[in-house]
């Protein structure tokens, strides 16, 4: 539930963290009784706890469709990510994946850990898929077919130009945005969003993940995964893997800042997309990951730790985002605050400083022009807290009680 040290530094994280823990335990108990649906929701919790929590915002019918959509694309992504599969085997599977989801008997051994289980028992996902409404099935099939073909294309092609980068991100994430918009529309809750806005929603999340996951991807065994476009990284080093070496730290940070600046171009589209949503549950489902993305970029920008380990938002702040994001005022406020945080880190000597500041100014202008910044919950930018000794003792006692309860809950009854 977040480290004790982090909570003591940010004591107002405690209540959101507690709520998050309780919500997580509650979500784990909301597993449907049917074996195939039980497998799908159990697997969802295993492959993405955060998504499993966010998806709870949705109505049951739409939640089922989005759950299956997510697992189908996770399975497709597992095939793409498995570098041990030979290309002549992988490409036909990716291209035909949209047909496999109709086959209750199909499965394919690949991936590791929970992803291996997903692939070995994929028939449960297919069975659940076949119980969805026809409009949901057609949307999922269409996006799966287009994504599989795009992934197959990039198995045999490196990401050279920024156009290649945008195209790859479109196939693996922009299409997710288009698919979700189709599912929202099929549910009758939303108008069908313009494709370019749906695409930007996916690209912003994907580019954030690609930036954050540099070290994990470059160290992938048996073969590195390289998604940063050569058009950007070649300005700073001879080989993409050179960015992780300490002697290239200055150039690595400049390249990182270039990548973050590229991602920021999608923010205004994302804000337009979210501002048009009418259904509160769909709005929260969409808004929470987007706020997490801008927060992650603010942490990654000008941060050499991206090339040394994992950079991510503290769990307490994540919990706040989940529970305090309820209106567009909250979204504008979060984007404004995180862009201020990012802006404060811009070094005027950085090669892309002017472009970065220009994009941040545009984001802040959009947030100001909304006219609702004064209504926001400002939980991002604030002064360092002064710890009250009494509060520290109380928090320690409460943590001890919760820890003892969790331990006792895990012990089997005699």
Image (cartoon, rainbow, N blue to C red):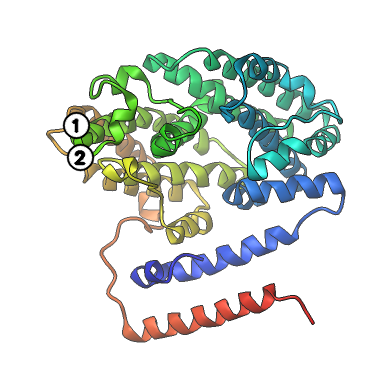
Residue at image x 51%, y 38%? 274
The answer to whether the residue labelled 1 contacts the one labelled 2, judged by CB atoms less than 8 Å apart, is: yes
Which sits earlier in the primary sequence, circle 1 or circle 2? 2
Q: Which residue is mark 2?
A: 346
Number of numbered labels in the structure image: 2
Coordinates of residue 255 in the picture (x, y in percent):
27, 29
Q: Please indicate whether residue 366 sits to the left or right of residue 49 in the image.
A: left
Local crowd at mark 1 within 10 Å, few (<14), some, or many (≥20)?
A: some
Local crowd at mark 2 within 10 Å, few (<14), some, or many (≥20)?
A: some
Q: Secondary structure at mark 2?
A: loop
For the C terminus, give its image quadrant.
Answer: bottom right
Alpha carbon separation for disc pair 1 and 2: 6 Å
Q: Please indicate whether residue 54 sits to the left or right of residue 328 in the image.
A: right
Does residue 58 appear anywhere in the picture? Answer: no
Disc ID at residue 70: none
Coordinates of residue 263 in the picture (x, y in percent):
37, 30
Coordinates of residue 285 in the picture (x, y in percent):
59, 45
Q: Please indicate whether residue 163 sits to the left or right of residue 40 in the image.
A: left
Coordinates of residue 56 in the picture (x, y in percent):
66, 51
Does residue 276 appear anywhere in the picture? Answer: yes
Q: Which residue is mark 1?
A: 353
Query: Where is 52 relative to 200, above or below?
Result: below
Q: Residue 389 falls in which quadrant of the image?
A: bottom left
Q: Secondary structure at mark 1?
A: helix
Residue at image x 36%, y 49%? 373
Query: Where is 22 relative to 335, above or below?
Result: below
């Amino acid at each position: 539930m977040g480290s004790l040290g982090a909570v003591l530094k940010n004591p107002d994280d405690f209540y959101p963290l507690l709520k998050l823990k309780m919500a997580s335990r509650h979500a784990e108990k909301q597993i449907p009784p049917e074996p195939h649906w039980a497998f799908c929701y159990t697997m969802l919790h295993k492959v993405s706890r955060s998504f499993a929590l966010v998806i709870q915002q949705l109505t049951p019918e739409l939640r089922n469709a989005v759950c299956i959509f997510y697992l189908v694309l996770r399975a497709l992504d597992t095939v793409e990510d498995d570098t041990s599969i030979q290309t002549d085997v992988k490409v036909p599977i990716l291209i035909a994946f949209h047909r496999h989801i109709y086959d209750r008997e199909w499965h394919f051994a690949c991936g590791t850990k929970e992803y291996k289980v997903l692939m070995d028992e994929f028939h449960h996902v297919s069975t659940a898929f076949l119980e969805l409404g026809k409009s949901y099935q057609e949307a999922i099939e269409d996006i799966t077919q287009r994504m599989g073909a795009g992934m197959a294309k990039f198995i045999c092609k490196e990401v050279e130009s920024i156009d290649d980068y945008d195209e790859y991100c479109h196939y693996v994430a922009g299409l997710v945005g288009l698919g979700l918009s189709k599912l929202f529309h099929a549910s009758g809750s939303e108008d069908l969003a313009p494709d370019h806005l749906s695409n930007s929603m996916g690209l912003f999340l994907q580019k954030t993940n690609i930036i954050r996951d540099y070290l994990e991807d470059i160290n992938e065994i048996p073969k590195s995964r390289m998604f940063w476009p050569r058009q950007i990284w070649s300005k700073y080093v001879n080989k993409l893997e050179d960015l992780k070496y300490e002697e290239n730290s200055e150039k690595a940070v400049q390249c990182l800042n270039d990548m973050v600046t590229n991602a920021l171009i999608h923010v205004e589209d994302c804000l337009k997309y979210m501002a048009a949503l009418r259904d509160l549950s769909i709005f929260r489902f969409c808004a929470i990951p987007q706020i997490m993305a801008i927060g992650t970029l603010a942490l990654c920008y000008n941060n050499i730790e991206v090339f040394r380990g994992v950079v991510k938002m503290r769990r307490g702040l994540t919990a706040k985002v989940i529970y305090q994001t309820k209106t567009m005022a909250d979204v504008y406020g979060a984007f404004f605050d995180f862009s201020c945080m990012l802006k404060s880190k811009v070094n005027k000597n950085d090669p892309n400083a002017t472009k970065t500041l220009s994009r941040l100014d545009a984001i802040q202008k959009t947030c100001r022009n909304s006219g609702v910044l004064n209504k926001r919950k400002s939980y991002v930018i604030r002064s360092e807290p002064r710890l009250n000794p009494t509060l520290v003792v109380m928090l320690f006692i409460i943590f001890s009680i919760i820890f003892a309860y969790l331990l006792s809950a895990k012990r089997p009854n005699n």
